[in-house]
Amino acid sequence: MAHADLVAHNQQFKKGIVTLAPGVYTAVGYAASNVHIIEGRTSLTIVDTTESLKAAENILLDLRALTDKEISKIIYTHSHRDHVSGCSVFRDGQQPVLACHLFSSDLMAVDPNVIAPNKALGRRTQAQFGIGLSPDERINLGCGPGDRPMEGLGQGFVPPTELIPADCDIDLDGVQARLIMAPGETDDHMIVWLPASRVLIGGDNWYHAFPNLYAIRGTAYRDFQTWADTLGAMAALNAEILAPGHTQPVMGQSVVEDVLLSTRDAILHVMRHTATGMDQGLSLDDIVTSLSLPKALGSKPWLREFYGKLGWSARAFAAGTLGWYDGNPTHLGTLSSTTRAQHMADLAGGIDALADQARLTKDLQWRLELCDHLMALGYAAQSLKAETMIRLADTEINATARNTYLFESKKLLEHS
Ligand SMILES: [Zn+2]
């Protein structure tokens, strides 16, 4: 089972090459992310390259039905793997690869002496994207189709050959374009503006879902204010067509303005709600559970939580601004999970009574928390926790939460 609206969100990943304006195209639904094509006098510029060799090959094959012009340039909107990993398919010679001067990819040399939780990041990335789930279980990725080729995943990355230091005008074989530094989902975002056709290629600063201000695979703080400011600057371009890094293009000046400004306002709302709550000394749990979008924003279909989530964003804003301490001195100290679980069992009247509570409660979140206490005491609550996560997954509109619940429930059952 799955949330009907998450299933309906699949229309955003309908596969095909969409014509945005004469000579400007976006390939949607072939991979987690989109590829944009700008046709010049005798050659093509490719903006973003997908996540895998196979997806890039499939796009190139369909593109060749539209034009046989050679590819003369490649541009990355930012460094995320799903945008840079099909590059070698499009770059069959020495074509320049352009990116923002802040471009930084973990596909480039990583210093083995740097201490980082890479194994945790790997597992959580697999969970978020539902790697190992069947396409039926993994309805979609929130930002991309649930079923897409995985051959050559991460294998076609080509490091940029030219770093762009600041906003600049550029001639793409007869098509005038402006490259604009646009920090948002990442600091190294560079978007492409085509003033003649009024097409804006916006990278991942906007897509048809609440923005992933915090990705549960594990991301450093994405500066909310900067992202909101960039959305305002993007709206000021008065684009007629917005080609996002994920989901279908947006057509029509007033709609483009609406999607950009309402998304900016949604980010500002989360910031204001969280900052006010923190100023009032509220707990993060209360800040999160009292957070929703005002009706004027909540009614926008592109602000539904298919990808990012309001509550996770509030937590990220709190941690990104004041750090982990929430202002409650109780949290200056720590109990081990076993000690806390033992206290809970004592309160309940013993471990069997605690297990009864876990089975009887109708509150699925509370049941998960009780299962954790039980498992901390060595009580076999794995199957109860797994079954509860599956029930939560079935009601989730957020693809990354759904995928994580299902992925982790399978792992839990494997090891119990
Ligand atoms: Zn992306």
Image (spheres, grey):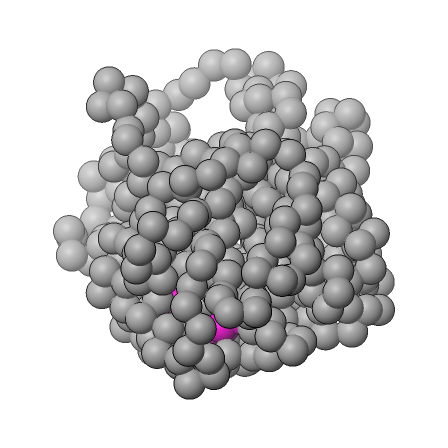
In this orientation, which residue lies closer to the viewer: 389 or 264?
Answer: 264
Q: Would residue 345 be visible to someone looking at this image?
A: no
Task: Farthest residue to the left: give it.
Answer: 415
Whether residue 112 is visible here, answered yes or no, is yes
The range drawn in magenta is 26-31
Q: Is residue 136 magenta?
A: no
The image position of residue 191, as x and y in percent, is: 62, 50
Q: Residue at x 28, y 46 (%)?
A: 123
Say how many tags the image has. Answer: 0
Residue extending farthest bottom = 65
**Quarter residue 336 falls in:** top left
Residue under the point 75% across and 65% down: 196
Question: Left or right: where does residue 294 sit relative to residue 274?
Answer: right
Is residue 28 located in the magenta-colored stretch of the structure? yes
Could you tell me residue 371's position as x and y percent?
34, 47
On screen, residue 234 versus residue 115, left or right, reads right
Q: Position of residue 188 (x, y in %)?
A: 54, 38
Displayed quadrant of residue 338 = top left
Q: In the drawing, does residue 338 fall left or right of residue 361?
A: left
Is residue 381 depicted above or below 149 in this figure? above
Is 207 displayed left or right of 353 in the figure?
right
Which of these two is toward me, 405 or 86?
Answer: 86
Quadrant of image for the N terminus:
bottom left
- Picture coordinates of residue 369 (x, y %)? 42, 45
In this view, the residue in front, 414 or 340, is 414
The residue closer to the viewer here, 29 or 46, is: 46
Residue at 75% x, 60% y: name it. Answer: 195
Q: Residue at x 28, y 68 (%)?
A: 54
